[in-house]
Image (cartoon, rainbow, N blue to C red):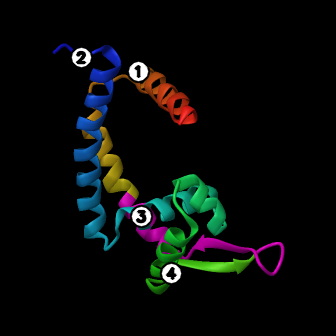
Amino acid sequence: MELKAHQVFFRRFTDLYRPFIQKTADILAEEGLTLPQWSTIRLIAEQEEMTPAELASRQYVEKPTVSRTVQQLLELGLIETRQGRDRREKKILLTDEGNQIYEKASRAIEKLEREVSDGISEQEMDAMSGRFAEMRRRL
């Protein structure tokens, strides 16, 4: 059976995604982190601070899932909370140790990304990134 172009595209995407995520998980395990913890740390680092609701929305997960991850990161001393605009809102930010872990893990993941994308021009990557963002908006 011959696959249609969109079927081949998504199969290739899945063929890339799963092993990439596994290699990323292996890198993070060396830092004592899980993928959900990394996702949370990365988002906070990129935004400087976030609320649990913002984290849940950006990660497409439920608030209880974020709460568990936030609790784990609090216990590890990688994040701290601060009072938001009102009593009910709490902002989450990285501690100094959280920033150090973020920097170290980022460098290791960037190395993997460079190895995987070697030979693909910046222009091609920009075009693909734009297409992926467009496709995500459709979900």
Q: Are marks 2 and 3 in contact (CB under 8 Å)?
A: no
Q: How many angstroms separate mark 4 from mark 1 (CA)?
A: 39 Å
Numbered mark located on residue 36 in the image: 3
Q: Is residue 19 above or below residue 129?
A: below
Q: Residue 17: x percent and y percent? A: 30, 41
Q: Residue 4: x percent and y percent? A: 29, 14
Q: Are marks 1 and 2 in contact (CB under 8 Å)?
A: no
Assess disc 4: are there few (<14), some (14-19) or many (≥20) residues with their C-alpha within 10 Å of its C-alpha.
few
**Kind of element beneath mark 4:** helix
Q: How many angstroms separate mark 2 from mark 3 (CA)?
A: 34 Å
Q: How many angstroms separate mark 3 from mark 4 (CA)?
A: 12 Å
Where, by quadrant of the figure, is residue 95 drawn? bottom right
Numbered mark located on residue 3 in the image: 2
Assess disc 2: are there few (<14), some (14-19) or many (≥20) residues with their C-alpha within 10 Å of its C-alpha.
few
- The answer, for residue 49, to whether it is visible in the render is no
Q: Which residue is mark 1?
A: 124
Magenta segment includes 27: no
Q: Inspect the image, locate mark 1, and give the three-letter code of the amino acid beneath it.
A: Glu
- Chain part drawn in magenta: 84-105
Question: Which residue: 54% across, 75% down?
Answer: 67
Give the left or right position of residue 105, taking residue 137 as reference: left
**Of 60 and 31, the residue lying toward us:** 60
Q: How many angstroms separate mark 2 from mark 4 (CA)?
A: 45 Å
Question: Which residue: 41% across, 69% down?
Answer: 101
Q: Nearer the viewer, mark 1 or mark 3?
A: 3
Q: Inspect the image, locate mark 4, and give the three-letter code of the amino acid beneath it.
A: Gln
